[in-house]
Image (cartoon, rainbow, N blue to C red):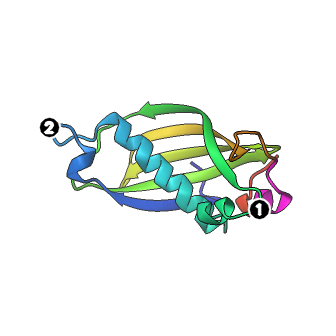
Amino acid sequence: MEREQVFTHTVRVYYEDTDFSGVVYHAAYLKFFERGRTEALRSCGVVHSQLLAREEPLVFAIRKMTTEWLSPARIDDLLDVRTQFTSAKGARMLLRQEIGRGDDLLARADVEAACISRAGRPRRLSAEMIRRFGAGA
């Protein structure tokens, strides 16, 4: 992953994230990716609670996600979730995410998120949001 506009969030692997053998269960990575996206948005000044408090509330919904697991994480590992906005236009944004432990790449995901109203209708990302993400069109 390029180093330009990459947001990093650190997570610790807890017992609840693992299976009986102490290896991270595959679905737990989805939570780690979600935390990374939320903190990347927060770093850009886009906060979920503020979007919900607007006159017309906005939310982000994951439309598509392609994941690849390369190596297992284990209980008590300290992981870096790296998130990069790769494109943002209209009502959608594309992100690339990686989870690593030190120099080891453990998992990666390509994510498509849609900006929608609380009623589920697509809503365009504002020019200001796109600018904050630093993502190309």
**Dot in front, 1 or 2:** 1
Q: Earlier in the sequence, mark 1 or mark 2?
A: 2
How far across and how far down the image is residue 66, in percent?
A: 54, 30
Q: Which residues are magenta?
A: 124-131
**Nearer to the camera, 106 or 9:** 9
Question: In the image, what residue type sits under mark 2?
Answer: Ser
Residue drawn at (76%, 56%), measured in percent from left and top? 56
Q: Which residue is mark 2?
A: 21
Question: In the image, what residue type sits under mark 1?
Answer: Glu
Q: Is residue 20 magenta?
A: no
How far across and how far down the image is residue 118, in percent?
A: 68, 47
Separation of marks 1 and 2 at Cα, in angstroms: 48 Å
Q: How many marks?
A: 2
Q: Is residue 123 above or below residue 45?
A: above
Q: Crowding near pointer 1: few (<14 within 10 Å), some, many (20+)?
A: few
Q: Which residue is mark 1?
A: 55
